[in-house]
Image: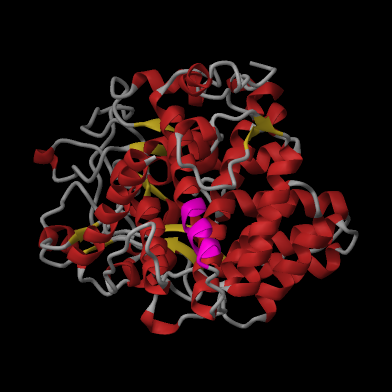
Amino acid sequence: MKKYSKLILSTLAFSLILLVLGGCQKFLDRKPLTATLDDLNQGGLEGQIYGLYSNLRNSSGFTTIPWLAVHDFRSDDSEKGSDPSDGAEWVAPFDKYQYVKDLWATNTYWDDHYSLINLANTAIQNADSLKLTDPASLINVAEARFFRAYAYFDLVRTFGEVPKIDFRVYTASQANIAKSPVTTIYALIDSDLQFAAANLPAVWGNQYPGRLTSGAAKTMHAKSYIFRGNWSSALALCNQVMASGNYSLFSSYYGIFKDAGENSSESIFEIQAYVSPNGAIDNGCGYATTMGVRASTASGWNLGWGWNTPTDSLVKAYEPGDVRKGSTILFSGQSDDPSTGGYGRVLPNSTFDPVSGPLPRKYWNKKIYADPAYRASTGHSDNPNWINKRILRYADVVLMAAECNNEMGNGAIGLPLVNQVRSRAGLGAISYTNQAQFRAAIKQERRVEFGVEGERFFDLVRWGDAVSVLGPQGYTNKCRYYPIPQPAIDKSGGKLIQNPEW
């Protein structure tokens, strides 16, 4: 037990040391704290909670290739990307649905999600054991419960039945338990997010940009309800978020994804990252680095690893005049288009062009396209790790509310909501004809609004459209759930059973 506690303490201490060294303006780097796990006061509990934010930012299962593989590569909007020879073993499992039971990507995804759950459980247990019920401590517990729900929502959508560990783990054997039904996992998510919504503040102000709010808890809860088809509960939460007046659609679509658009009026929750202008302070996140344009340094376009690239299917999905197309996709051999967030540069040709060029893909993710001047000042030309990862946006609330209204037979009420999103995209208003027509329109808007943001695959699954849309790539219904990582099963000694379809 002591050895395990020291391991947890070392993890927390390391996270807090990172925070102490940061010194940036984002809240994770503003208030360094030290704490032990067995001698806590409220300040120590808050230190543990800061460690949860840091853990999220630094975990590959939430921010880099493992997350992208599970959430993006499996859709029809993106593919593995990079050079064809780089990570070739990722193509079959994620682009072609030939799932592998023992693969670094999903092993890491599983481990990192349970690591966050474990840290959240520890914080919750410490607060409970010390009977910390003051307002500040309740906020800290609410943050921990949000993160636990967030991790379980990913797990239950990805794997189906998973072990429900909602208690502090002192020894590895305590965590070696059987899977729980999907309904049981969702019941925990409901309880956690209800508590979070009731105890988190509506706003933090400038002191803590990016810190969790009641709006974030309600939005995440609405997403979990809509995934289950619980339209009325999801709509009630969306209506509360919209009525709060704390959020709005950002003025320009491309602006959401620029440095100045971080924690904007549209932001409900983002993973915070920071690198100082001279590069001396680096509290970065690997999210954008994994997706930057991949090329030789000599070409001037070595901007990242080049994973998670848009597909022809996504390019063709946009209506003429939709500014989201040029704001989402960089085209090899073309201008980066300053009118949709570019910097007046022309990309080299790709090897797909008749006159082959140095870029291995036709398209790249423009939502993580960093300012060349800031790249130069930091010295991070191929590592734009100061870019926040957008998790929850107000546009999602608006489109979820429209969808809920339509599914409840009130599509005409949802129509102005969809047209708000279309107007920002430079498109004209659509009309409501019937439920089926409006349902198709909402599906279209969600696709182009959240291109390469990790929403499409799970949308197709919950709509029941995955087989028809992804079937030509090899998808079958059993691919809605990924097999549980084989190393986790092997270590369980028979307590953890593989998904029955695998």
Q: Answer whether residue 155 is visible to the viewer in this image.
A: yes
Q: Quadrant of the image for the C terminus?
A: top right
- State left or right for residue 160 relative to residue 485: right
User: Residue drawn at (27%, 48%), measured in percent from left and top?
Assistant: 10
- State left or right for residue 8 relative to residue 489: left
Q: Answer whether residue 426 is visible to the viewer in this image.
A: no
Quarter of the rendering containing residue 138: bottom right
Q: Of residues 417 and 63, which is closer to you in this image?
A: 63
Is the residue 179 above or below the residue 449 in the image?
above
Q: Of residues 296 and 74, which is closer to you in this image?
A: 74
Q: Of residues 429 and 89, which is closer to you in this image?
A: 89
What is the basis of the colouring in this image? secondary structure
- Percent x, y for residue 21? 17, 64
- Percent x, y for residue 108? 41, 32
Q: Is residue 126 magenta?
A: yes
User: Residue drawn at (28%, 46%), measured in percent from left and top?
Assistant: 289
- Percent x, y for residue 80? 41, 30
Q: Quadrant of the image for the N terminus?
A: top left
Q: Of residues 346 and 265, which is closer to you in this image?
A: 265
User: Residue drawn at (47%, 53%), measured in percent from left and top?
Assistant: 122
- Percent x, y for residue 47? 36, 66
Is the residue 82 above or below the residue 442 in the image?
above
Write the start and end of the magenta stretch as one range. Answer: 120-130
Q: Is residue 128 magenta?
A: yes
- State left or right for residue 25 relative to residue 440: left
